[in-house]
Every structure is written in structure tokens, then in C-alpha cells.
Amino acid sequence: MKDQEPQRNGSFADADLATECTAKLAALTDNLKALADEGLTPAMLTAFEKQITAFQALPTDENLLYTVVKSTAKRDAALEAARTGLRQVSQPIARAYGNESPEYRSLAIGEVTRKTVPETLQVLLTAPGVGTVFVDDKQAQDQGFSAARLAALAPLYADLFACEGKMHAAETARTGATRSRVLAYNALNTECSSQCARGYDHFVELDASKARLFVRNLAGHADTAPPTPNTQA
């Protein structure tokens, strides 16, 4: 069973979350002395700052999508080159024997534009071996068939195979990075809420203006409910 992809635990855009956390970090830093009573330490602030910076440094989906698009374009170009090479092998045989003949069918090339990439790779591998029987065939030679056309398939296979692999690697990297970014988002959002609760609990009955510094996103796009004072003894 496929694992369910993680979902963001807040409604902030990624950049807005970083901005929110930076503002809360500043408020925590300014009130470190008072919040020491709540267990806040300079090491905690340093760790929070590093967490914000690390999140900001993660590649965005736009960064990763560019790599996927570029690698897909190269794969598509290699695929079209492979199709052209296969046509150059099959067309002389079709002209010599007809495209319904056993000779033509033996190459298994057929309509290459309908073949998937794996199918195209398979034919690029098998056609040279099958096609050698036509290298000295006068009827095929008269239509332009040659050993050179078969030999051209090997580098086309290598290029298409490599480009297909790079495209899938880019797609996999994008998927993995997206998952990592969501997990980092959730961890940072949770940490920010935890630290804000610490500040809010301390000031809510002492200084309302300072308590408001620790309410998440006063602009009205709160990811979580404002912290509530801890009234338990």
C-alpha cells in the first residue's frame, strides 16, 4: 500500500511562514530574560533560528520543476531521434518487401510514434540483430538499406536510455524534496506555535501588549488558534 503523502499543518505560504517565524523569533529574543522563567534558553533561540534558515534554504517546487521540464525535453528529443533512426531502418525494407511482409514485420518496428519509451528501447536493441539478414540482401540494398543504418541505433539507444533515466531521477528528486519541504514546514510551524505559547502564557495576565506579540499571525490568516493561557497549577 502506497504511503500517504504528508499535508501541511498550516495555511501560511512557505515564504510567509518563514517571515512569521522570524518575527516571533525577534519577540522571543527581546523577551528572553523574562521568558527564562518559562524555560526559554539562548540555545533554543539559536536552534529556532537555524530551523528557519534551513527551511528557507530548501529548494522550492518551482526550482525542481525546472529540472524536470528540462530533462523531459531532452528525453523527448532523444526519443524523436530514436524514432527517426528506426524509420531509416524499416522504410527500405517496407519499400523492398511491403509493410505487410514477413520481412518488414520481423523488425518489429511498425508505427514507432505509438510505441512507449520502453518499447522503443526494446526495438532499438533487437532491430540490429534481426536486421543483419538484410545487409547483403540485394532487394533491400536497392532501397537504401545498409549496415550503417543498423549501427546508428546503438548510440540512439544509449542516449535515450540515459535521458529517460535522468528524467525519472529528476521526477523522483522533486517528489522527495516536496515531501521533505512539507515535513520541514510542519516541524517549523509546530515549533513556532510552541514557542509562542510559551510567550503568551507568560505575558497574558501581566502585559496584554506583549502577549499579543506571541499570537500567531494577527493579519487574520492564523494557522492555529491563538495560544491559551495554561491555567493548570
Image (tube, rainbow, N blue to C red):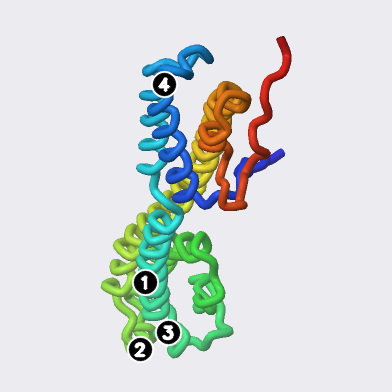
Residue identifier under label 3: 91
Mark 2: amino acid = Gln
The extreme top residue here reads: 233
Using the image as rendered, state which of residue 181 and residue 5 is in the foreground: 181
Q: Are marks 2 and 3 in contact (CB under 8 Å)?
A: yes
Q: Do we see residue 147 in this rendering?
A: yes
For marks 3 and 4, the one nearer the N-term is: 4
The residue indicated by pointer 2 is: 143
Determine the residue positioned at 33% across, 58% down.
Answer: 158
- Please state which of residues 137 and 144 is positioned toward the viewer in this rendering: 144
In whole angstroms, how far apart are the C-alphas of marks 2 and 1? 27 Å
State the image quarter where residue 7 is shown: top right
Q: Quadrant of the N terminus?
A: top right
Q: Residues within 10 Å of mark 3 (few under 14, many from 20)?
A: many
The alpha-carbon separation of the residues under discs 1 and 3 comes to 21 Å
Mark nearer the N terminus (1 vs 4): 4
Mark 1 vs mark 3: in front? 1
Inspect the image, locate mark 4, and give the three-letter code of the amino acid beneath it. Leu
